[in-house]
Image: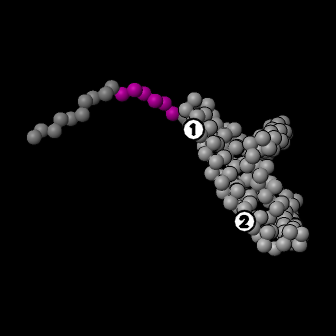
Amino acid sequence: MRLLGLVALFILVPIAELYLILKVGDSIGILFTVLLLAADSVLGSVLLRTQGRTVWRRFNEALASGRMPHREVQDGVAVIFGAAFLITPGFITDIFGLALLLPPTRALLLSVVRKRLAGRMAARVAQGPVPGSGPGPGYDVEGTASEQPSTPPPRLEQ
């Protein structure tokens, strides 16, 4: 079912993007539409640079203070996806890209994602182990051990 959703997403989003680009082109003209899409791409690369540096600095500060930088990693992934969406031509992906690149909306979106993932993880833990998982067959080896006195290695004569 998830695969079908992804296939639909990869088919429907480009169709919707093309439709919206054509509608905007009808309204403001082809030249201005192309310039607007180019400006979005430039804005995406500038925001990637500035937000990427900020996230990278916070990541290094977290490591230097001795704590795990899990939030900084999440911010970094969101910035990369946001920049990719913004650099991709199209107005729908630009909206998602801006939402992931701007810190207030990024924090809001990441909190929603964290809550959804926490719920899924709690449900997974409550289910218990997956059938068939766990330790493999054990081997029981019987024997005895005894300590031998150590002797110095023989000396080589020259």
Type of the residue with mark 1: Asn
Dominant secondary structure of the residues highlighted in magenta in the image: loop
Type of the residue with mark 2: Ala
**Left or right: 53 in relation to 81:** left
Return the mark for residue 94.
Answer: none
According to the picture, the residue beneath numbered tag 2 turns out to be 38
Return the mark for residue 60.
Answer: 1
**Left or right: 158 in relation to 68:** left
- Picture residue at 73% right of the left edge, 53% below the top: 82
- At mark 2, the secondary structure is helix
Residue 121: image quadrant is: top right
* Magenta-drawn stretch contains 123: no
- Picture residue at 31% right of the left edge, 28% below the top: 150
* Magenta-drawn stretch contains 147: yes
Residue 46 percent across, percent down from the top left: 65, 54
Residue 63 percent across, percent down from the top left: 57, 35
Visible in this render: residue 128? no
Q: Start and end of the magenta stretch?
A: 143-148
Packing grade of label 2 (10 A; few <14, some 14-19, many >=20) is: some
Nearest the eye: 119 or 9: 9
State how far apart marks 1 and 2 are (Cα). 33 Å
Q: Quadrant of the C terminus?
A: top left
